[in-house]
Image (cartoon, rainbow, N blue to C red):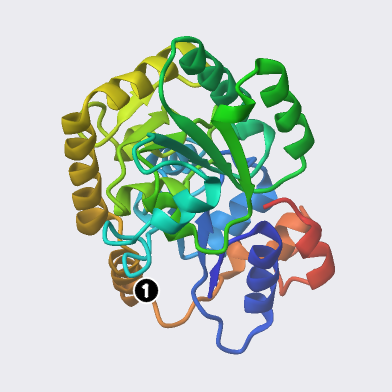
Amino acid sequence: MHVHRGKEHWLAAVANRFAASPRPIVRTRHIVQAVRPHALNRWLYGRATSLVVTVTEAIRRQYVSAKLVPAERVVALPGGVDLGRFHPGVDGAGFRRSLGIAPDVPLVGLVAGLRVMKGHPVAVEVARRLAERGRRFHMVFIGAGALEAGIRRAIADAGPQDRVSMAGFVADLPAAIAAFDVALYAAFESEGMSRVLFEYLAMGKPVVATRVGVVPEVLEDGRTALLVPAEEPGPLTAAIERLLDDAGLRARLGGEASALARERLSGAQVARALAALYAQLPRRAGARCGEDLGALLRPGRQCRRARVSPRAAARAPG
């Protein structure tokens, strides 16, 4: 059983305790918030779970340092991208026309939900600075979310309304990204893995990215992307200007990005890696008496079969 969230993890673990033929549990951890190392989580991860997969090395180190899982039972495996959909051959001309942007106007694109951590206010400030310096460009935000009204107000207050578009939800995301001349990842809080970042890379786009989450683990500054500090419009503006001025650099970064996606980040490669990990797991998973969840919930009582309802276990932190 492969689970991805705390509730289903607990349900699977408790179901395994009552199953005649318990199965190995694999948990993928996608977020950077540390798991609390209390007794229940020590049982859940250390005893009831056969393997933990994390989307970044930093998250893997959290588990090891907290002693929740032995180092040999937690592996870092970034998520993959569908190279059949996201590749440099996709045509973006239609999306550019939908924005009313001329073919020779550099398009800077940001794909992200309209949430606080995604960095849209910083991107708006970057657009203001670029416009103030007389740069020829257009910026587009793709995505939806609760902060749409606030972001529209920020664009209006900053002044570059004619330079920034909000496209909302886009059904054909590969075609939209294909129109970008520069792809922007401006998040200022680590979110573990960013799927859209891998999609940028797969499509061969020159990327400017903030150093959060998986970014510094996957990308190399100056070779596969330009990396900048989070929440700082100055370095972000400078990096975009550098790309706008240097077509050769854009082409080189885009080529390296595409090669990286093909070599290390494809969905097929991730699937093969998971299959290899599954093959190493035992066919059955069981808990010895000393591993009984009931013993943790009833300290001092004799170890025996746990009597914990699935509903109660599902509410436990994971």
Residue drawn 77% across the image and 53% down it: 299
Q: Is residue 174 left or right of residue 303?
A: left
User: Disc 1 residue type?
Assistant: Tyr
Q: Is residue 12 left or right of residue 150?
A: left
- Residue, disc 1: 278
Residue drawn 55% across the image and 88% down it: 21
Query: Residue 312, percent across and down?
Result: 83, 63
Name above or below for residue 221 compared with residue 67.
above
Q: Does residue 78 appear anywhere in the picture?
A: no
Q: Quadrant of residue 296?
A: bottom right
Q: Does residue 28 appear anywhere in the picture?
A: yes
Label 1 sits on a secondary structure element that is: helix
Name above or below for residue 186 compared with residue 204.
above
Query: Residue 267, percent across and down?
Result: 35, 65
Name above or below for residue 222 compared with residue 291.
above
Residue drawn 29% across the image and 36% down it: 219
The residue closer to the viewer here, 211 or 8, is 211
Query: Residue 148, percent across and down?
Result: 74, 39
Q: Quadrant of residue 162?
A: top right
Q: Is residue 317 left or right of residue 211?
A: right
Residue drawn 46% across the image and 65% down it: 50
Q: Residues within 10 Å of mark 1 (few under 14, many from 20)?
A: some
Q: Is residue 175 left or right of residue 310?
A: left
Query: Residue 276, percent across and down?
Result: 29, 71
Name above or below for residue 270 compared with residue 109.
below
**Number of marks present in the image shown:** 1
The residue closer to the viewer here, 113 or 310, is 113
